[in-house]
């Protein structure tokens, strides 16, 4: 498993870093990384890159997300959730229609305040470290792209929303801003990431499940190769080209079995005829080597 991903279901109460550490130990591999931090309070989809897949993280993390979040009205907190001290704001019972109208306003590309207790870096320091020292009250603002906010359930003071959004969106910020606009305050009291790109919670695996799969020798059922996740062309080369590629030499036209040059993108995978990934390349015009090597996959 040298360029694979596993769709892990992170359980609440554990950090994303700890999940990565567990997967690394479980599979006995040195290179592991996740696609997008989930707060300890949160649970849900946390794709883990294995081996060479970590080098595709920038491509793989720039995908849309979906969250199911619980909120509590009438209070606010420094962290925008219920993990820090709650401050009473109001006993006003907000109408369901007012919440729906506010959520509708909080869609599109909008600038929202980033929670002080977040992993955002400020002058090279994580915001939450500064917040713990009382040095910041928030971590500035960021443009976040929110496609939809849907109120799924509401019984004062609790409600549940489904949020479809782009990369870098803080669900806590949406809820905090909603509370401010409604004049009653609001904090996030629970969060599930239900989808991260093509990865969904329905097809994810808890650490305990992965442990059983490793023990039973069926872990291959839980992995997805990186080349199935990116819409790049897939070229296939003859066996005689494999050694050349591993020596860092871009193959010429004659060494390809299949060359999908009609593919619209500039990035391509090079595979052997047994569907093993050999290299990542980019298109080159007017050259005897149509695809230039960018990264060679070593086994």
Image (cartoon, rainbow, N blue to C red):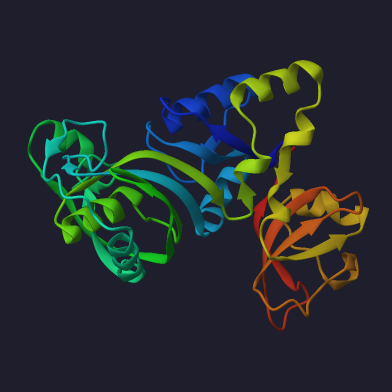
* Residue 35 located left or right of residue 159: right
Q: Quadrant of the N terminus?
A: top right
User: Looking at the image, which residue is at 20% across and 31% down?
Assistant: 84
Q: Position of residue 172 (x, y in %)?
A: 30, 48
Q: Which residue ends up furthest to the top in the rendered image? A: 215
User: Looking at the image, which residue is at 47% across and 50% down?
Assistant: 67
User: Looking at the image, which residue is at 10% across and 31% down?
Assistant: 133
* Residue 136 located left or right of residue 280: left
Q: Position of residue 155 (x, y in %)?
A: 35, 45
* Residue 187 located left or right of residue 293: left
Is residue 107 in sight in this rendering? Answer: yes
In the rendered view, would you say 257 is above or below 17? Answer: below
- Where residue 80 sits, quadrant-wise, is top left
Q: Position of residue 229 (x, y in %)?
A: 67, 55
- Where residue 75 sits, quadrant-wise, is top left
Front residue of 265/102: it is: 102
Front residue of 5/54: it is: 5
Q: Position of residue 195 (x, y in %)?
A: 56, 50
Q: Quadrant of the C terminus?
A: top right
In the rendered view, would you say 213 is above or below 42? Answer: above
User: Looking at the image, which residue is at 24% across and 61% down?
Assistant: 112
In the rendered view, would you say 185 is above or below 16? Answer: below
């Amino acid at each position: 498993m040298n360029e694979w991903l596993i769709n892990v279901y992170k359980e609440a109460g554990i950090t994303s870093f700890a999940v990565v550490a567990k997967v690394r130990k479980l599979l006995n591999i040195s290179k592991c990384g996740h696609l997008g931090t989930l707060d300890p309070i949160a649970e849900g989809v946390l794709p883990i890159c294995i081996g060479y897949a970590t080098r595709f993280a920038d491509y793989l993390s720039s995908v849309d997300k979906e969250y199911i979040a619980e909120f509590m009205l009438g209070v606010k907190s420094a962290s925008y959730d219920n993990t820090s001290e709650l401050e009473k704001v109001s006993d006003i019972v907000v109408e369901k229609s007012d919440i729906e109208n506010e959520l509708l306003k909080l869609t599109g590309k909008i600038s929202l305040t980033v929670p002080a207790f977040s992993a955002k870096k400020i002058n090279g320091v994580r915001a939450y470290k500064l917040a713990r020292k009382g040095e910041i009250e928030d971590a500035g603002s960021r443009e976040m792209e929110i496609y939809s906010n849907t109120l799924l359930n509401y019984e004062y003071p609790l409600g549940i929303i489904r949020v479809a959004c782009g990369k870098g969106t803080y669900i806590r910020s949406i809820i905090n801003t909603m509370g401010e606009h409604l004049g009653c305050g609001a904090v996030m009291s629970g969060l599930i990431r239900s989808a991260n790109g093509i990865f969904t919670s329905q097809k994810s695996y808890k650490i305990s499940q992965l442990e059983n799969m490793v023990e039973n020798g069926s872990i291959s059922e839980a992995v997805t190769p990186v080349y199935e996740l990116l819409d790049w062309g897939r070229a296939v080369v003859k066996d005689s080209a494999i050694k050349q590629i591993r020596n860092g030499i871009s193959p010429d036209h004659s060494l390809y079995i299949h060359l999908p040059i009609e593919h619209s993108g500039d990035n391509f995978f090079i595979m052997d005829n047994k569907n093993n990934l050999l290299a990542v390349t980019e298109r080159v015009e007017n050259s005897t080597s149509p695809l230039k090597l960018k990264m060679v996959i070593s086994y």
